Amino acid sequence: MSDDGVGINDKVAIFDTTLRDGEQSPGISLDVGEKLEIAEQLARLGVDYLEAGFPSSNPKERELFAALEREDMRSMKVAAFGMTRRRDTTPDTDDGLRGLAECFAPVATVVGKTWDLHVLEVLRTTLPENLRMIADSVCHLHGQAREVVYDAEHFFDGLVANREYALATLQALKEAGRPIGLISDCSPEVPLLWDETPLAEFIADPVLSCAVGLRKPDARIYLLACERLGVDPYRAVFVGDGDSNEIQGAADVGLCPILVDRGETSAFRVSESDHCGIVVHDLTQVLPLIGLETVEAG
């Protein structure tokens, strides 16, 4: 507990992708036994999430998931990897989504296209249909009692190539229940103008200092934002430019802080040299780091 009685959670959730991304490294090929050994070691280390692979892809992957179901992974959650539904299908008839729903893994990682080039040339579908594919897939797996981690593939490339469409994928996630929040120290006119800003369509319930009577780095303002989003602080990230000591305030309540350092100087703003955590120099650099999720990749 903090001095003012506000509860603080200092846990950061670790999402490990060794058994999928790691095995794609040149010269790496693991058998089921070796993968189980790695999984057991990660469980002993206290890793929170293990992305084990694509259960529908081949017999070796199915054998691995069957073995993981028999093993004691302690508190570590196993995640199964898959893709959004195919074009012109429904989630309940899609083989890949059916495999995720039938797999014992309580977590499903779903990769979707956010670069319009990939939508048009790889998926060979329309941009609106791809948005429906994302939202349908996430909603379907939530309905199957799965915790869903969405992987926004090539979001940075998509943002550069077609900003409007890349942001539209965020809207699809918002409609599928993926929360985005805002904490702002601001003057009284901001709440009056909020609905006219471009951010309003993505952030339904911002926490504005003049409206709630709190300012950063007060722990209560961060916890209020998490409460409104319906998320635990340790499963969320906070992105800011370091003004008002906001980065340390976010870290103190268990959020994973990311500093956006654009080289601006201020007596009230933390700089890259003063921050030992994650630093980016542009907001677009945040997206590949978090894959649009609130668990930190390990």
Image: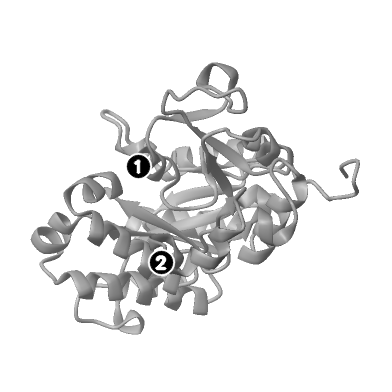
Q: What residue type is labelled 1?
A: Thr
Within 10 Å of the Cα at label 2, are there few (<14), some (14-19), or many (20+) other Cα atoms?
many
Residue at the disc numbered 1: 284
Camera-side residue of 152 and 84: 152
Residue 173 is labelled as 2
Q: Is residue 147 visible?
A: no
Which is nearer the eye, 235 or 226?
Answer: 226
At 62% from the left and 57% from the top, the residue drawn is 208
Query: How far is mark 1 from mark 2, CA to CA?
Result: 17 Å
Q: 290 or 182: nearer the eye?
A: 182
> Within the image, what quadrant is residue 124 found in?
bottom left
Would you place residue 3 above or below residue 99 in this image?
Answer: above
- Among all residues in the image, which is located at the extreme top? 273
Say which residue appears at 56% left-offset and 46% top-offset: 237
Q: Which corner quadrant of the image does residue 267 belong to?
A: top right
Dot 2: element:
helix
- Looking at marks 1 and 2 on the same chain, the residue that comes earlier in the sequence is marked by 2
Residue located at (12% from left, 59% from top)? 122
Residue drawn where x is 56% and y is 49% of the image: 49
Q: What residue type is labelled 2?
A: Leu
> In screen coordinates, is 201 left or right of 186?
left
Q: In which quarter of the image is the N terminus?
A: top right
Picture coordinates of residue 90, whole percent (x, y): 29, 83
